[in-house]
Amino acid sequence: MSQAVGTTQTGIRTVPRPTAQQSRIQGETIEFILTVALGLVILAAALVYVWQHTYVVRLGYEIERLRERHSALVQENKALRLEMGQLRSLKRVEEMARKQMGMISPKPGQVTLVPESAVQ
């Protein structure tokens, strides 16, 4: 059935009333759209959770790898400092000077001490 909208003048338009079946179809369509939207929201939330969990696990492995690397570098640093101390040893330098360069200890009278006031 149609219902007149407006006055009885010319150009009056009639708008059909929605039937019960049309209302039911519109309700089902809206319900379907809401169900799909809810499903998409749940799917998006699940994907974000899985991504976040995977990211945290990957960072955990990266942290462990970096800790091992740090430990190895600390050990290497200790070994290099020990080697540096041994190479700087005056006893070693004197030994190298005598054996490899043929140097000898100075005899008395060969060493001249310069006073600090003369050094500028």
Image (tube, helix red, strand yellow):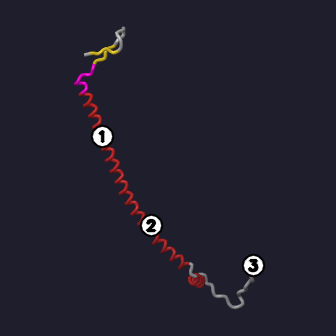
Residue, x 34% and y 9% (percent of image)? Answer: 8
**Which is more toward the observer, 34 or 40?**
34
Amino acid carrying mark 2 in the image:
His
Quick check: 69 above or below 3? below
Q: Which residue has dot 3 on it?
A: 119
- Which is in the foreground here, disc 2 or disc 3? 2
Amino acid carrying mark 3 in the image:
Val
Q: Dividing the picture into quarters, in which one does residue 67 lie?
A: bottom left
Q: Residue 38 carries which label?
A: 1
The answer to whether marks 3 and 1 mark residues whose Cβ atoms lie closer than 8 Å is no
Residue, x 31% and y 17% (percent of image)? Answer: 15
> Which mark sits nearer the N-terminus, 2 or 3?
2
Badge 3, how many Cα within 10 Å: few under 14, some, many 20+?
Answer: few
Q: Which residue has dot 2 on it?
A: 70
Q: Circle 3 — which element?
A: loop
Q: x and y percent of residue 87 in the render? A: 55, 78
Badge 2, how many Cα within 10 Å: few under 14, some, many 20+?
Answer: few
